[in-house]
Amino acid sequence: MQYKIEKAVELFTIVWAAEIENIKDVIEQYCYFIDDSYKACQLTSFAHNLFDQYQSGTSALILHKELRSLKELATGISHQRAIESQLLPDLSALTRDRAKFKGTIPVMELENDKVPL
């Protein structure tokens, strides 16, 4: 039983770490481990549609919302619960201190990226 729980946590972590560029592959691999063929079909279809939207240039805001919905559907865990379970990093402290540290991180140009005068 402990092994199943550890494997589930590992799979949930992989799903929550997935990005739009690899969500189709991640979900296809994830579906091998779930025991509900209807849900596997639903998740795979959702992931393929989402990836097609990404390739067609759909807005990032829409893609982000859909990606979050897919991850929640796949794992049964809400975004907030994923943060509480440490499947996702908690960025609230970062946004809280945003005004204090605005513009403090220097961005250097690469040597090969010479800007013409």
Image: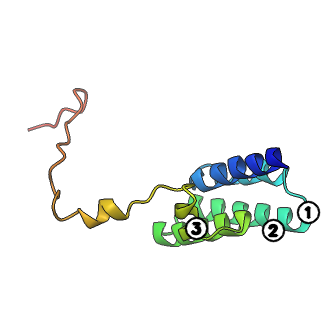
Please give the residue where the numbered disc 2 appears in the rendered image: 42
Give the percent coordinates (x, y) of residue 96: 27, 66
- Where residue 67 sits, quadrant-wise, is bottom right
Contact (Cβ within 8 Å) of mark 1 with mark 3: no
Judged by depth in the image, the label closer to the viewer, 1 or 3, is 3
- Residue positioned 18% across, 65% down in the render: 99
Q: Is residue 73 above or below residue 27?
A: below
Instruction: Please tell me how crowded label 3 is: few (under 14), some (14-19), or many (20+) other residues with Cα within 10 Å.
Output: few
- Colour scheme of the picture: rainbow
Q: Quadrant of the C terminus?
A: top left
Q: Name the residue type under label 1.
A: Ser
Give SS at disc 1: helix
Instruction: Identify the mark at residue 81; answer none if there is no mark.
Output: 3
Judged left or right of residue 104, residue 36 is: right
Give the percent coordinates (x, y) of residue 103: 15, 54
Q: Name the residue type under label 3.
A: Arg
- Residue positioned 91% across, 63% down in the render: 37
Q: Is residue 95 above or below residue 110?
A: below
Report, in whole angstroms, how far the alpha carbon at label 3 lies from the one at label 2. 22 Å
Marks 1 and 3, the one that precedes in the sequence = 1
**Residue furthest top in the image:** 111
Q: Nearer the viewer, residue 13 or 28?
A: 13
Give SS at disc 2: helix
Instruction: Please tell me how crowded label 1 is: few (under 14), some (14-19), or many (20+) other residues with Cα within 10 Å.
Output: few
Instruction: Identify the mark at residue 37; answer none if there is no mark.
Output: 1
